[in-house]
Amino acid sequence: MKQDTLDSLKRYADMGIPTGGFLRAVLENNLMEAFGRADRQNSEDMAEIVGYVYNEMPIGCHGSPEKVRAWLDSFKKEVK
């Protein structure tokens, strides 16, 4: 997995910083969209990326668009 991909996932999980469209699709469990947005390297690394999200990231931050939205919203509330 590319370092910038990993860094983006960590910023999202730890600080609620939104990812780009490719990773957002992965986090929302929309793999057709994810493959459509992936560059060549991310496409080749898809199994590793999905494995990292599933095994290493908090369960509440991925799996559907609603979960991703709620995760991001939870950080907005902390800032206020």
Image (cartoon, rainbow, N blue to C red):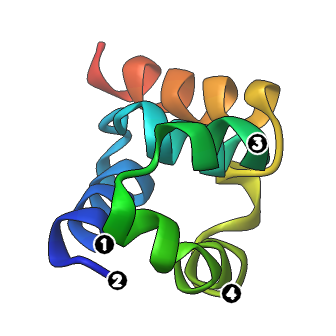
Q: Which residue is mark 4?
A: 55
* Disc 2 crowd, CA 10 A, few/some/many (<14, 14-19, 20+): some
Q: Amino acid at mark 1?
A: Leu
Q: Report if the CB atoms under discs 2 and 1 are less than 8 Å apart.
A: yes
Residue 1, numbered circle: 2
* Disc 1 crowd, CA 10 A, few/some/many (<14, 14-19, 20+): some
Mark 1 or mark 3, which is nearer to you? 3
Residue 30 visible in image: no
In percent of width and height, residue 55 lies at: 68, 87
* Disc 3 crowd, CA 10 A, few/some/many (<14, 14-19, 20+): few
Q: Which residue is mark 3?
A: 32
The one of 46 and 3 positioned closer to us in this rendering: 46
User: How far apart, in angstroms, are the residues tagged by discs 4 and 1?
Assistant: 13 Å
User: How far apart, in angstroms, are the residues tagged by discs 4 and 3?
Assistant: 21 Å
User: How far apart, in angstroms, are the residues tagged by discs 1 and 3?
Assistant: 20 Å
Q: Residue furthest left?
A: 4
Disc 3 secondary structure class: helix
Q: Report if the CB atoms under discs 2 and 4 are less than 8 Å apart.
A: no
User: How far apart, in angstroms, are the residues tagged by discs 2 and 1?
Assistant: 7 Å
Q: Which residue is mark 1?
A: 6
